[in-house]
Amino acid sequence: MGDLLQIIVAKYNYWIYITLMMIGLYAMIGKNNLVKKIVGMSIFQTAIILFYVSIGVKKGATIPILEHGHGEHGHSAAALIVHAVDYVNPLPHVLMLTAIVVGVATLGVALALAIKVHNRFNTLEEDEILAQIREK
Amino acid sequence: MKIIGLIIAILTGVLLLSATADFPIFGDPDSPASTHLSPYYIEKTMEDTSVPNIVTAVLADYRGYDTMYETAVIFTAGLACFIILRIFVREEPGDRLYRHVLTGVTVRVKEGAKLPPSDDFERIDTMWTPPDLIIKTVCRLLIPFIQLFGLYVIAHGHHSPGGGFQGGVILGASIILLAISTDLRTAVQRMREKVDAILCPVGVIIYAGTGALCILFGFNFLDYSALAPLLHVDPITARSHGILIVEIGVGIAVMCTMIWIYNILSSGGKYDEGL
């Protein structure tokens, strides 16, 4: 039991992201309402963003912006020696920065489709939509 | 269906959790993600581009090709919303409501007739409710500062957290705030749909055009050091300036897409009366 607890504490970021991700997955599969499915998709997306950002963390490191003085541009500052351990991994931040904005844009498309479905069937419940399709 | 979903979710969760045994522990500086490529970026960014913010440098320079297509994806998402929802109906000769600004008297004009445009009367929605004084005043005071902050975030993205994506979203949010605090008609008067639809691809074209300009100077696509003779700076500072140019393009594209998507969604495609 003590071992398991130690494993959980050492890797708690993965436990959080997997829990969030499964909440999103369950909402996408189990919920009947289309808007709730879209919300589930957003939660899923957030879990992946959290996962990426947590991978970039280094203990004792600071944000990935190099220390620099004002006024001195370019080459004089470039002479400073930079150690990689002092700054967190910038790559996950770059990937997720675009993913967040693209996520918002695709969420807009999903909501537009939901509005279109509501215009056509007058409902957003999946089983009612399926029943209406089968009637025809 | 709910039970099947629950079983699938729990099974996948257990599978993923068992896989974390091979993952590096939280905050490990020697994890595989932090050992191969990222030390190069951290140590060489200042020499290569003279940009202190590593995230901006990687975003717009080292991985510029990727970001260009991300911008294209955002533009495509806006376009998709437009194609899915936008309805072009010739305005039927229905009743129009006008409100006298000073006295608050509402005038109903029948069968498509219009009042001549004047400052005394403003056109209002059919579901119009009086705006709250506090909300309207606070938003009117805040919106210019929000826009100024958005411009700062774009322009200062080299030295502090920020860049085109973040600044573009802030600028878009300022116009959306205007639409929420007053009504959609007021916001559309400030930023018409035509402007939105033109500026969206213009942002992408600024990005791709900067890359194409580099080809014209005989360098690789998106190799901003080619712009050095044009900007009268040395090649390394030219890369820093090239990043600023493409960030401006990204900011324009993101801002317009956010406003466009909000306006289309909130009006259900009619683009006249929203929330």
Image: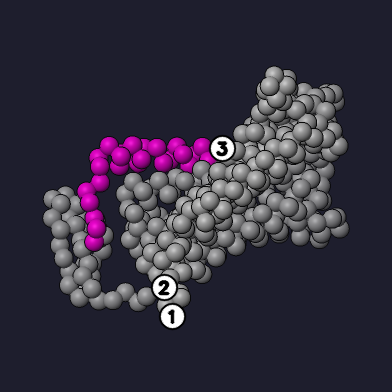
The one nearer the camera, A104 or A21, is A21
Which subunit holds the residue at mark 1? A
In this figure, what is the number of numbered marks? 3
Q: Which residues are magenta?
A: B126-153
Q: Is residue A63 left or right of residue B228?
A: left
Callout 3 amino acid = Tyr
Q: CA distance from mark 1 to mark 3?
A: 56 Å
Q: Residues within 10 Å of mark 3 (few under 14, many from 20)?
A: some
Q: Is residue B159 above or below residue A136?
A: above
Q: Is residue B149 magenta?
A: yes
The one nearer the camera, B141 or A1, is A1
Name the residue tied to disc 3: B152
Q: Is residue B229 magenta?
A: no
Image quadrant assignment for residue B49: top right
Examine the rendering and report whether any part of residue A91 can be seen: yes
The mark lying in front, picked from 2 and 3, is: 2
Residue lying at the far bottom of the rendered structure? A136
Name the residue tied to disc 1: A136
Q: CA distance from mark 2 to mark 3?
A: 52 Å
Name the residue tied to disc 2: A132
The one nearer the camera, B108 or A12, is A12
Residue B14 got which mark?
A: none
Most frequent secondary structure within the magenta stretch: helix
Q: Is residue B70 above or below residue B57?
A: below
Which subunit holds the residue at mark 3? B
Tell me what residue is drawn at x 44 percent, y 45 percent: B174
Callout 2 amino acid = Gln
Tell me what residue is drawn at x 40 percent, y 37 percent: B142
